[in-house]
Image (spheres, grey):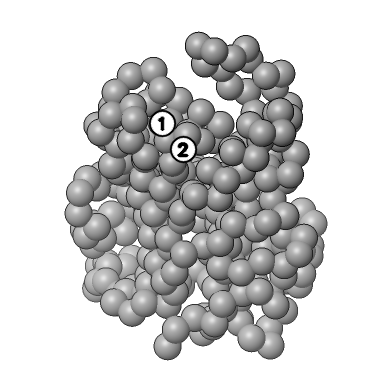
């Protein structure tokens, strides 16, 4: 296995959720400080595995493996769009709910309109690039989208790369995955999320992994050297407790996380993408 990227994603200071909260000034200031404590670590690596082709012979398949670790402090959990957190507020849970391994994820457009994991793949000197979206939570958990752009945000709407069915593969405490069997059914694999939550007072960490077959990249990107992992978390300012009434809900606002940011945030701007490790 070869590590291509490993590091913390930073939060853009220009994220709408940091600047447009419909809360009293003192409360908004405290919430913003806590939102800035959300931490996201991403590792992207390559690996190979044997897989059986149409002629029943084994071939080597190259994989790009994405690991996202997202830690959300207790104080901001009521505000963040993450279904497992909503359930945690109602009852103690030890792990996130299982997703149904018999119900594959599917290609779903506009996943970026809610909390979403993303990564952009490109090559120096080449104008086209690929964007991968995977939904980490909620009713679309495990759904994905992959887009191919010929140039900066062109065309619109982007060209969708329609992959084989996504298969959700159970994984509990180990980060190892029996890829050989599941590759026969899938092109993107989504492992089961693991939450380190033990009770209502704890911070919550979510682990998400998905796997992409490099053979599906366009020919121009087979020897890619640029990666840009990012995350969008949506936040709203509806909250109530025993001592405070409900604040009128406004349009959910984004937190933008990436390895580096344009100003204003723009994940498509290649000037801020990372060189992948050799």
Left or right of 228? Residue 5 is left
- Residue at 51%, 36% (x, y): give it: 76
Left or right of 89? Residue 24 is right
Residue at mark 2: 137
**Crowd around label 1: few <14 · some 14–19 · many ≥20 (10 Å):** some
Q: Position of residue 262 (x, y in %)?
A: 72, 67
Q: Position of residue 70 (x, y in %)?
A: 42, 50
**Crowd around label 2: few <14 · some 14–19 · many ≥20 (10 Å):** many
Res 47 quadrant in image: bottom left
The answer to whether residue 269 is above or below residue 204 is: below
Residue 268 visible (yes or no): no
The answer to whether residue 180 is above or below residue 232 is: below
Between 252 and 220, the residue placed more toward the observer is 252
> Mark 2 vs mark 1: which is more N-terminal?
1
* Element type where label 1 sits in the image: helix
- Residue at 38%, 60% (x, y): give it: 67
Q: Are marks 2 and 1 in contact (CB under 8 Å)?
A: yes
Residue 76 visible (yes or no): yes
* Element type where label 2 sits in the image: loop
Q: Position of residue 246 (x, y in %)?
A: 63, 15
Residue at mark 1: 84
In which quadrant will I find the N terminus? bottom left
Between 153 and 36, the residue placed more toward the observer is 36
- Residue at 72%, 33% (x, y): give it: 25
The answer to whether residue 253 is above or below residue 62 is: above
């Amino acid at each position: 296995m070869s590590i291509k990227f490993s590091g913390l994603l930073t939060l853009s200071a220009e994220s709408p959720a940091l600047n447009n909260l419909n809360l009293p000034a003192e409360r908004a200031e405290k919430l913003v400080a806590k939102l800035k404590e959300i931490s996201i670590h991403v590792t992207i690596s390559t690996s190979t595995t044997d897989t059986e082709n149409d002629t029943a012979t084994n071939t080597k398949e190259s994989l790009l493996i994405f690991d996202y670790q997202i830690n959300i402090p207790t104080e901001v959990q009521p505000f963040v769009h993450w279904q497992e957190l909503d359930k945690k507020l109602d009852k103690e849970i030890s792990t996130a709910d299982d997703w149904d391994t018999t119900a594959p994820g599917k290609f779903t457009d506009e996943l970026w309109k809610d909390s979403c994991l993303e990564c952009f793949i490109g090559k120096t000197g080449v104008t086209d690039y690929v964007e991968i979206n995977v939904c980490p939570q909620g009713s679309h958990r495990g759904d994905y989208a992959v887009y191919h752009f010929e140039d900066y945000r062109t065309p619109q709407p982007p060209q969708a790369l329609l992959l084989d069915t996504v298969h959700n593969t159970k994984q509990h405490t180990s980060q190892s995955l029996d890829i050989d069997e599941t590759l026969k059914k899938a092109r993107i694999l989504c492992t089961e999320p693991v939450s380190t939550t033990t009770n209502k007072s704890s911070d919550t960490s979510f682990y998400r992994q998905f796997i992409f077959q490099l053979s599906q990249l366009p020919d121009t990107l087979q020897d890619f050297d640029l990666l840009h992992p990012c995350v969008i978390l949506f936040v709203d300012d509806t909250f109530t407790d025993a001592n405070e009434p409900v604040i009128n809900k406004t349009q959910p606002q984004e937190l933008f996380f990436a390895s580096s940011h344009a100003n204003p945030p723009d994940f498509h701007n290649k000037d801020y993408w990372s060189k992948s490790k050799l």
